[in-house]
Protein backbone atom coordinates (compact mmCIF):
# COMPACT_ATOMS: atom_id res chain seq x y z
CA UNK A 1 0.00 0.00 0.00
CA UNK A 2 1.72 3.14 -1.23
CA UNK A 3 0.98 6.25 -3.21
CA UNK A 4 0.73 10.03 -3.24
CA UNK A 5 -1.90 11.91 -1.26
CA UNK A 6 -2.86 15.51 -1.92
CA UNK A 7 -4.22 17.62 0.93
CA UNK A 8 -6.45 20.57 -0.05
CA UNK A 9 -7.66 23.40 2.18
CA UNK A 10 -7.78 27.18 2.31
CA UNK A 11 -4.65 27.20 4.49
CA UNK A 12 -2.18 24.92 6.23
CA UNK A 13 -0.41 27.02 8.81
CA UNK A 14 0.57 27.08 12.45
CA UNK A 15 -1.51 25.58 15.22
CA UNK A 16 -5.10 25.87 14.01
CA UNK A 17 -7.00 22.61 14.44
CA UNK A 18 -7.32 21.74 10.75
CA UNK A 19 -3.60 22.23 10.12
CA UNK A 20 -2.58 20.20 13.17
CA UNK A 21 -4.84 17.26 12.37
CA UNK A 22 -3.79 17.34 8.71
CA UNK A 23 -0.16 17.02 9.77
CA UNK A 24 -1.05 14.03 11.95
CA UNK A 25 -2.84 12.36 9.03
CA UNK A 26 0.20 12.95 6.84
CA UNK A 27 2.48 11.45 9.47
CA UNK A 28 0.34 8.32 9.73
CA UNK A 29 0.03 8.04 5.93
CA UNK A 30 3.81 7.95 5.78
CA UNK A 31 3.59 4.66 7.69
CA UNK A 32 1.77 3.30 4.63
CA UNK A 33 4.45 4.70 2.32
CA UNK A 34 2.14 7.49 1.23
CA UNK A 35 3.83 10.77 0.41
CA UNK A 36 1.80 13.89 1.20
CA UNK A 37 1.50 17.03 -0.91
CA UNK A 38 -0.24 20.27 -0.04
CA UNK A 39 -2.53 22.71 -1.88
CA UNK A 40 -3.75 25.85 -0.11
CA UNK A 41 -4.11 29.59 -0.33
CA UNK A 42 -1.39 29.86 2.30
CA UNK A 43 0.78 27.13 3.74
CA UNK A 44 3.97 26.71 5.71
CA UNK A 45 4.88 23.38 4.10
CA UNK A 46 8.02 22.95 2.01
CA UNK A 47 7.73 24.37 -1.52
CA UNK A 48 9.05 21.06 -2.81
CA UNK A 49 5.87 19.27 -1.78
CA UNK A 50 3.26 22.04 -1.91
CA UNK A 51 1.58 24.56 -4.13
CA UNK A 52 0.41 27.91 -2.81
CA UNK A 53 -2.50 29.33 -4.79
CA UNK A 54 -3.25 32.77 -3.28
CA UNK A 55 -6.80 32.80 -4.66
CA UNK A 56 -7.59 29.71 -2.57
CA UNK A 57 -7.14 31.60 0.71
CA UNK A 58 -10.37 32.74 2.36
CA UNK A 59 -8.84 36.20 2.88
CA UNK A 60 -7.98 36.71 -0.78
CA UNK A 61 -9.55 40.04 -1.86
CA UNK A 62 -11.79 38.41 -4.46
CA UNK A 63 -13.19 35.94 -1.96
CA UNK A 64 -13.65 38.68 0.64
CA UNK A 65 -15.60 40.67 -1.96
CA UNK A 66 -17.83 37.67 -2.61
CA UNK A 67 -18.38 36.92 1.08
CA UNK A 68 -19.43 40.49 1.78
CA UNK A 69 -22.30 40.02 -0.70
CA UNK A 70 -23.56 36.52 0.07
CA UNK A 71 -23.74 36.31 3.88
CA UNK A 72 -26.45 38.13 5.80
CA UNK A 73 -28.24 39.01 2.57
CA UNK A 74 -31.26 37.54 0.75
CA UNK A 75 -30.59 38.48 -2.88
CA UNK A 76 -27.58 37.81 -5.09
CA UNK A 77 -26.78 39.87 -8.14
CA UNK A 78 -25.72 38.38 -11.49
CA UNK A 79 -22.26 39.93 -11.02
CA UNK A 80 -21.69 38.00 -7.81
CA UNK A 81 -22.75 34.77 -9.53
CA UNK A 82 -20.42 35.51 -12.43
CA UNK A 83 -17.45 36.10 -10.15
CA UNK A 84 -18.13 32.97 -8.09
CA UNK A 85 -18.18 30.91 -11.27
CA UNK A 86 -15.09 32.59 -12.68
CA UNK A 87 -13.05 32.04 -9.55
CA UNK A 88 -14.28 28.47 -9.20
CA UNK A 89 -13.31 27.77 -12.80
CA UNK A 90 -9.83 29.12 -12.25
CA UNK A 91 -9.33 27.18 -9.02
CA UNK A 92 -10.55 23.99 -10.65
CA UNK A 93 -7.80 24.32 -13.27
CA UNK A 94 -5.19 24.77 -10.53
CA UNK A 95 -6.41 21.58 -8.84
CA UNK A 96 -6.00 19.71 -12.13
CA UNK A 97 -2.43 21.04 -12.32
CA UNK A 98 -1.73 20.12 -8.69
CA UNK A 99 -2.90 16.54 -9.20
CA UNK A 100 -0.96 16.14 -12.43
CA UNK A 101 2.26 17.72 -11.15
CA UNK A 102 2.55 15.44 -8.11
CA UNK A 103 0.97 12.36 -9.70
CA UNK A 104 -1.59 12.09 -6.93
CA UNK A 105 -3.57 8.93 -6.20
CA UNK A 106 -6.03 10.29 -3.65
CA UNK A 107 -7.20 13.70 -2.47
CA UNK A 108 -7.86 14.54 1.18
CA UNK A 109 -10.07 17.61 1.49
CA UNK A 110 -9.59 19.31 4.85
CA UNK A 111 -12.75 21.20 5.85
CA UNK A 112 -13.00 23.00 2.51
CA UNK A 113 -16.22 21.09 1.75
CA UNK A 114 -17.73 21.68 5.19
CA UNK A 115 -17.33 25.28 6.35
CA UNK A 116 -18.13 27.70 3.47
CA UNK A 117 -15.44 30.29 4.10
CA UNK A 118 -14.56 29.97 0.42
CA UNK A 119 -17.55 29.13 -1.78
CA UNK A 120 -15.58 29.14 -5.08
CA UNK A 121 -13.01 26.69 -3.73
CA UNK A 122 -15.72 24.28 -2.58
CA UNK A 123 -17.40 24.52 -5.98
CA UNK A 124 -14.04 23.98 -7.72
CA UNK A 125 -13.25 20.86 -5.70
CA UNK A 126 -16.73 19.47 -6.31
CA UNK A 127 -16.42 20.12 -10.05
CA UNK A 128 -13.02 18.44 -10.18
CA UNK A 129 -14.20 15.35 -8.31
CA UNK A 130 -17.35 15.06 -10.44
CA UNK A 131 -15.36 15.33 -13.67
CA UNK A 132 -12.52 12.99 -12.74
CA UNK A 133 -14.10 10.55 -10.27
CA UNK A 134 -10.77 10.68 -8.47
CA UNK A 135 -10.72 8.85 -5.11
CA UNK A 136 -11.08 11.37 -2.29
CA UNK A 137 -11.71 11.70 1.43
CA UNK A 138 -13.43 14.77 2.88
CA UNK A 139 -12.36 15.41 6.48
CA UNK A 140 -15.08 17.60 7.96
CA UNK A 141 -14.24 19.50 11.15
CA UNK A 142 -17.28 21.79 11.37
CA UNK A 143 -20.28 22.38 9.10
CA UNK A 144 -21.99 25.59 8.02
CA UNK A 145 -25.22 24.66 9.80
CA UNK A 146 -23.32 24.77 13.09
CA UNK A 147 -22.57 28.49 12.67
CA UNK A 148 -25.35 31.06 12.93
CA UNK A 149 -23.50 33.55 10.75
CA UNK A 150 -24.09 31.32 7.72
CA UNK A 151 -27.83 30.87 8.32
CA UNK A 152 -28.89 33.88 6.22
CA UNK A 153 -27.34 33.77 2.77
CA UNK A 154 -27.85 34.01 -0.98
CA UNK A 155 -25.97 30.84 -1.95
CA UNK A 156 -28.32 28.03 -0.88
CA UNK A 157 -27.81 26.12 -4.12
CA UNK A 158 -24.02 26.19 -3.72
CA UNK A 159 -24.28 25.01 -0.12
CA UNK A 160 -26.51 22.18 -1.25
CA UNK A 161 -24.21 21.25 -4.12
CA UNK A 162 -20.77 21.47 -2.54
CA UNK A 163 -20.86 21.67 1.28
CA UNK A 164 -20.45 18.77 1.16
CA UNK A 165 -21.29 17.23 -2.22
CA UNK A 166 -22.86 13.83 -2.86
CA UNK A 167 -20.28 12.14 -5.08
CA UNK A 168 -19.75 8.36 -5.22
CA UNK A 169 -15.95 8.59 -5.16
CA UNK A 170 -15.93 10.83 -2.06
CA UNK A 171 -15.78 9.32 1.44
CA UNK A 172 -16.83 11.50 4.35
CA UNK A 173 -15.06 11.66 7.72
CA UNK A 174 -16.41 13.58 10.73
CA UNK A 175 -14.98 14.09 14.20
CA UNK A 176 -18.01 13.44 16.41
CA UNK A 177 -21.29 11.52 16.52
CA UNK A 178 -23.52 14.59 16.33
CA UNK A 179 -21.89 15.66 13.07
CA UNK A 180 -22.35 12.15 11.68
CA UNK A 181 -26.07 12.22 12.41
CA UNK A 182 -26.57 15.74 11.05
CA UNK A 183 -24.68 14.93 7.85
CA UNK A 184 -26.81 11.84 7.28
CA UNK A 185 -30.03 13.70 7.99
CA UNK A 186 -29.24 16.81 5.96
CA UNK A 187 -27.34 15.29 3.04
CA UNK A 188 -28.30 11.63 3.02
CA UNK A 189 -24.68 10.49 2.99
CA UNK A 190 -22.90 8.10 5.31
CA UNK A 191 -19.69 8.95 7.13
CA UNK A 192 -17.22 7.48 9.58
CA UNK A 193 -16.03 9.07 12.81
CA UNK A 194 -12.30 9.60 13.15
CA UNK A 195 -11.63 11.63 16.30
CA UNK A 196 -8.75 14.01 16.73
CA UNK A 197 -5.76 12.15 18.11
CA UNK A 198 -2.41 12.56 19.86
CA UNK A 199 0.70 10.41 19.84
CA UNK A 200 -0.08 8.71 23.15
CA UNK A 201 2.20 5.83 22.18
CA UNK A 202 5.09 8.26 22.66
CA UNK A 203 4.73 10.39 25.81
CA UNK A 204 6.09 13.95 25.69
CA UNK A 205 9.71 14.41 26.80
CA UNK A 206 10.48 16.41 29.95
CA UNK A 207 11.05 20.16 29.51
CA UNK A 208 14.34 20.92 27.79
CA UNK A 209 16.73 23.74 28.60
CA UNK A 210 14.72 26.28 26.59
CA UNK A 211 11.50 25.60 28.51
CA UNK A 212 13.05 24.97 31.91
CA UNK A 213 12.57 28.57 33.06
CA UNK A 214 8.98 29.11 31.93
CA UNK A 215 7.82 30.00 35.44
CA UNK A 216 10.59 32.52 35.98
CA UNK A 217 10.01 34.09 32.56
CA UNK A 218 6.31 34.50 33.36
CA UNK A 219 7.03 35.93 36.82
CA UNK A 220 5.76 32.82 38.58
CA UNK A 221 7.49 31.38 41.64
CA UNK A 222 8.25 27.68 42.23
CA UNK A 223 5.61 27.67 44.98
CA UNK A 224 2.85 29.11 42.81
CA UNK A 225 0.01 26.79 41.82
CA UNK A 226 -0.33 27.29 38.08
CA UNK A 227 -3.85 26.82 36.74
CA UNK A 228 -3.61 26.91 32.95
CA UNK A 229 -6.43 28.00 30.64
CA UNK A 230 -4.98 26.91 27.25
CA UNK A 231 -7.49 28.58 24.92
CA UNK A 232 -8.32 31.73 23.06
CA UNK A 233 -10.22 34.38 25.00
CA UNK A 234 -13.68 34.08 23.47
CA UNK A 235 -17.05 33.74 25.27
CA UNK A 236 -17.66 30.09 24.38
CA UNK A 237 -14.55 29.09 26.36
CA UNK A 238 -16.33 29.86 29.65
CA UNK A 239 -13.24 31.34 31.30
CA UNK A 240 -15.38 33.04 33.94
CA UNK A 241 -15.79 29.58 35.51
CA UNK A 242 -12.01 29.26 35.84
CA UNK A 243 -11.95 32.59 37.67
CA UNK A 244 -14.69 31.38 40.02
CA UNK A 245 -12.72 28.20 40.68
CA UNK A 246 -9.58 30.10 41.69
CA UNK A 247 -11.64 32.43 43.84
CA UNK A 248 -13.22 29.51 45.71
CA UNK A 249 -9.91 27.71 46.18
CA UNK A 250 -8.96 30.62 48.47
CA UNK A 251 -5.24 30.04 48.07
CA UNK A 252 -3.09 33.07 47.18
CA UNK A 253 -0.57 30.75 45.54
CA UNK A 254 -3.09 29.95 42.78
CA UNK A 255 -2.40 31.85 39.55
CA UNK A 256 -4.73 31.62 36.55
CA UNK A 257 -2.60 31.70 33.37
CA UNK A 258 -4.45 32.32 30.10
CA UNK A 259 -2.33 31.35 27.11
CA UNK A 260 -3.97 32.84 24.03
CA UNK A 261 -5.20 36.18 22.77
CA UNK A 262 -8.74 37.46 22.39
CA UNK A 263 -8.75 36.73 18.67
CA UNK A 264 -11.16 38.24 16.19
CA UNK A 265 -14.22 38.56 18.44
CA UNK A 266 -13.27 41.84 20.07
CA UNK A 267 -11.98 42.79 23.51
CA UNK A 268 -15.26 43.06 25.44
CA UNK A 269 -15.07 39.54 26.84
CA UNK A 270 -11.44 39.90 27.86
CA UNK A 271 -12.18 43.21 29.57
CA UNK A 272 -15.10 41.62 31.42
CA UNK A 273 -12.83 38.79 32.61
CA UNK A 274 -10.21 41.27 33.82
CA UNK A 275 -12.82 43.19 35.82
CA UNK A 276 -14.24 39.97 37.23
CA UNK A 277 -10.80 38.69 38.30
CA UNK A 278 -9.95 41.99 39.97
CA UNK A 279 -13.24 42.11 41.86
CA UNK A 280 -12.80 38.47 42.91
CA UNK A 281 -9.23 38.92 44.08
CA UNK A 282 -7.97 36.39 41.50
CA UNK A 283 -4.43 36.72 40.11
CA UNK A 284 -5.05 36.17 36.39
CA UNK A 285 -2.20 36.44 33.88
CA UNK A 286 -2.72 36.94 30.14
CA UNK A 287 0.53 35.66 28.63
CA UNK A 288 -0.32 35.72 24.92
CA UNK A 289 2.65 38.01 24.20
CA UNK A 290 4.96 35.25 25.45
CA UNK A 291 3.28 32.34 23.64
CA UNK A 292 3.46 31.64 19.92
CA UNK A 293 3.42 28.89 17.32
CA UNK A 294 7.22 28.55 17.38
CA UNK A 295 10.09 29.28 19.72
CA UNK A 296 11.70 32.61 18.88
CA UNK A 297 12.98 35.71 20.62
CA UNK A 298 10.80 38.81 20.53
CA UNK A 299 11.97 42.33 19.74
CA UNK A 300 13.11 42.75 23.35
CA UNK A 301 15.11 39.54 23.29
CA UNK A 302 12.64 37.64 25.48
CA UNK A 303 11.80 33.99 24.88
CA UNK A 304 8.56 33.17 23.08
CA UNK A 305 7.27 29.79 24.25
CA UNK A 306 4.89 27.37 22.60
CA UNK A 307 1.78 26.14 24.38
CA UNK A 308 3.45 22.77 24.79
CA UNK A 309 6.23 24.49 26.74
CA UNK A 310 3.61 25.67 29.24
CA UNK A 311 1.80 22.39 29.91
CA UNK A 312 4.61 20.70 31.93
CA UNK A 313 4.61 23.63 34.36
CA UNK A 314 0.85 23.54 35.01
CA UNK A 315 -0.65 22.03 38.16
CA UNK A 316 -4.17 21.98 36.77
CA UNK A 317 -5.80 22.71 33.41
CA UNK A 318 -9.21 24.39 33.16
CA UNK A 319 -11.40 23.72 30.13
CA UNK A 320 -14.89 24.98 31.04
CA UNK A 321 -16.03 25.48 27.43
CA UNK A 322 -19.70 25.95 26.65
CA UNK A 323 -19.30 24.45 23.17
CA UNK A 324 -16.54 22.67 21.25
CA UNK A 325 -16.50 20.77 17.98
CA UNK A 326 -14.15 18.30 19.62
CA UNK A 327 -11.81 19.52 22.35
CA UNK A 328 -8.11 19.23 21.56
CA UNK A 329 -7.07 21.04 24.74
CA UNK A 330 -8.66 18.28 26.83
CA UNK A 331 -6.55 15.62 25.11
CA UNK A 332 -3.47 17.82 25.29
CA UNK A 333 -3.80 18.07 29.05
CA UNK A 334 -4.17 14.31 29.33
CA UNK A 335 -1.17 13.82 27.02
CA UNK A 336 0.93 15.88 29.46
CA UNK A 337 -0.60 13.98 32.38
CA UNK A 338 -2.34 17.01 33.84
CA UNK A 339 -5.67 16.92 35.70
CA UNK A 340 -8.47 18.82 33.96
CA UNK A 341 -11.55 20.65 35.14
CA UNK A 342 -13.92 20.36 32.20
CA UNK A 343 -17.46 21.44 31.47
CA UNK A 344 -19.86 18.80 30.18
CA UNK A 345 -20.33 20.38 26.75
CA UNK A 346 -22.39 18.31 24.31
CA UNK A 347 -19.59 16.60 22.35
CA UNK A 348 -17.68 15.72 25.52
CA UNK A 349 -20.79 14.31 27.17
CA UNK A 350 -21.69 12.18 24.18
CA UNK A 351 -18.39 11.09 22.65
CA UNK A 352 -15.67 11.36 25.28
CA UNK A 353 -17.05 11.05 28.81
CA UNK A 354 -18.44 7.53 28.21
CA UNK A 355 -14.91 6.33 27.44
CA UNK A 356 -14.21 6.46 31.18
CA UNK A 357 -12.20 9.62 31.80
CA UNK A 358 -12.02 10.75 35.43
CA UNK A 359 -11.76 14.16 37.05
CA UNK A 360 -13.85 17.16 38.06
CA UNK A 361 -16.65 17.68 35.54
CA UNK A 362 -18.91 20.73 35.63
CA UNK A 363 -22.48 20.45 34.43
CA UNK A 364 -22.89 24.02 33.23
CA UNK A 365 -21.93 25.48 36.60
CA UNK A 366 -19.12 25.18 39.12
CA UNK A 367 -20.29 23.12 42.08
CA UNK A 368 -18.90 22.71 45.58
CA UNK A 369 -18.00 19.12 44.74
CA UNK A 370 -15.95 20.37 41.76
CA UNK A 371 -13.98 22.70 44.03
CA UNK A 372 -13.52 19.97 46.63
CA UNK A 373 -12.17 17.53 44.03
CA UNK A 374 -9.78 20.14 42.64
CA UNK A 375 -8.47 20.73 46.16
CA UNK A 376 -7.86 17.01 46.57
CA UNK A 377 -6.05 16.86 43.24
CA UNK A 378 -3.79 19.76 44.21
CA UNK A 379 -2.95 18.44 47.66
CA UNK A 380 -2.99 14.64 47.29
CA UNK A 381 -0.07 13.58 45.04
CA UNK A 382 -1.02 9.88 45.05
CA UNK A 383 -4.61 10.58 44.01
CA UNK A 384 -3.41 12.99 41.34
CA UNK A 385 -0.96 10.44 39.91
CA UNK A 386 -3.60 7.71 39.83
CA UNK A 387 -6.04 10.07 38.08
CA UNK A 388 -3.73 11.26 35.33
CA UNK A 389 -2.33 7.77 34.67
CA UNK A 390 -5.84 6.38 34.32
CA UNK A 391 -6.82 9.13 31.88
CA UNK A 392 -3.66 8.58 29.85
CA UNK A 393 -4.49 4.88 29.52
CA UNK A 394 -8.02 5.67 28.34
CA UNK A 395 -6.73 8.15 25.77
CA UNK A 396 -4.12 5.65 24.58
CA UNK A 397 -6.91 3.21 23.81
CA UNK A 398 -9.33 5.58 22.09
CA UNK A 399 -7.38 8.63 20.82
CA UNK A 400 -3.91 7.42 19.84
CA UNK A 401 -2.20 7.32 16.48
CA UNK A 402 -2.96 3.58 16.42
CA UNK A 403 -6.67 4.45 16.13
CA UNK A 404 -5.97 6.88 13.29
CA UNK A 405 -3.66 4.38 11.60
CA UNK A 406 -6.36 1.71 11.53
CA UNK A 407 -9.08 4.09 10.36
CA UNK A 408 -7.01 5.68 7.62
CA UNK A 409 -5.89 2.31 6.31
CA UNK A 410 -9.55 1.31 6.03
CA UNK A 411 -10.54 4.56 4.32
CA UNK A 412 -7.70 4.50 1.80
CA UNK A 413 -8.34 0.84 1.05
CA UNK A 414 -12.06 1.44 0.50
CA UNK A 415 -11.68 4.50 -1.67
CA UNK A 416 -8.99 2.96 -3.88
CA UNK A 417 -10.66 -0.41 -4.11
CA UNK A 418 -7.63 -2.30 -2.79
CA UNK A 419 -7.46 -5.48 -0.75
CA UNK A 420 -6.32 -5.23 2.87
Image (cartoon, grey):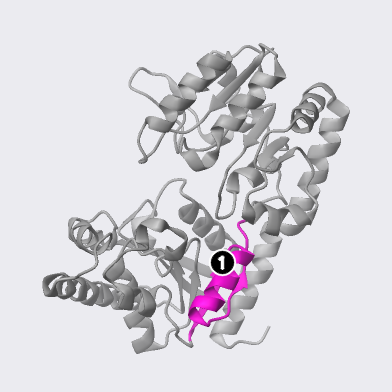
User: Residue, x 47% and y 20% (percent of image)?
Assistant: 275
Q: Is residue 191 magenta?
A: yes
Snapshot quadrant of residue 299: top left
The x and y percentages for residue 400 are 69, 56
Front residue of 410/419: it is 410
The x and y percentages for residue 303 are 45, 23
User: Residue, x 55% and y 71% (percent of image)?
Assistant: 182
User: Residue, x 66% and y 87% (percent of image)?
Assistant: 419
Snapshot quadrant of residue 37: bottom left
* Residue corresponding to mark 1: 179
Vertical comparison of 46 with 309: above or below? below
Front residue of 240/260: it is 240
Farthest residue, direction left: 79
Circle 1 sits in a helix, a strand or a loop, which is it? helix
Q: Quarter holding the N terminus?
A: bottom right
The x and y percentages for residue 33 are 57, 70
Binning the other alpha carbons within 10 Å of mark 1 as few (below 14), some (14 to 19) or many (20 upward) gives many
User: Residue, x 73% and y 33% (percent of image)?
Assistant: 367
- Is 358 situated left or right of 320 in this image? right
Residue 373 appears anywhere in the view:
yes
- Is 324 situated left or right of 298 in this image? right
Snapshot quadrant of residue 267: top left
- Magenta-tinted stretch: 169-196
Q: Is residue 298 magenta?
A: no
The x and y percentages for residue 222 are 67, 13
Vertical comparison of 85 with 219: above or below? below
Amino acid sequence: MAGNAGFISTRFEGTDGVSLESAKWAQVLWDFQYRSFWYAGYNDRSPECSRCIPEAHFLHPENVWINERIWGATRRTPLVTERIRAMAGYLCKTIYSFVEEFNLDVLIIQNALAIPMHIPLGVAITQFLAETQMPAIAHHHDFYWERSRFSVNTVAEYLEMAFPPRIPNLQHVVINAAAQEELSWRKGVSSVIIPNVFDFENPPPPPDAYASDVRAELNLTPDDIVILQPTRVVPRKGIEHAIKLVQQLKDPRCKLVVSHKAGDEGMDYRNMLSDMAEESGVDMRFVETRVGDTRVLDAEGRKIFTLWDLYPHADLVTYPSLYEGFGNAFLEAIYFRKPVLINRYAIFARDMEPKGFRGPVMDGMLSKSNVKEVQRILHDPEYRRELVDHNYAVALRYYSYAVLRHQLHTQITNIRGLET
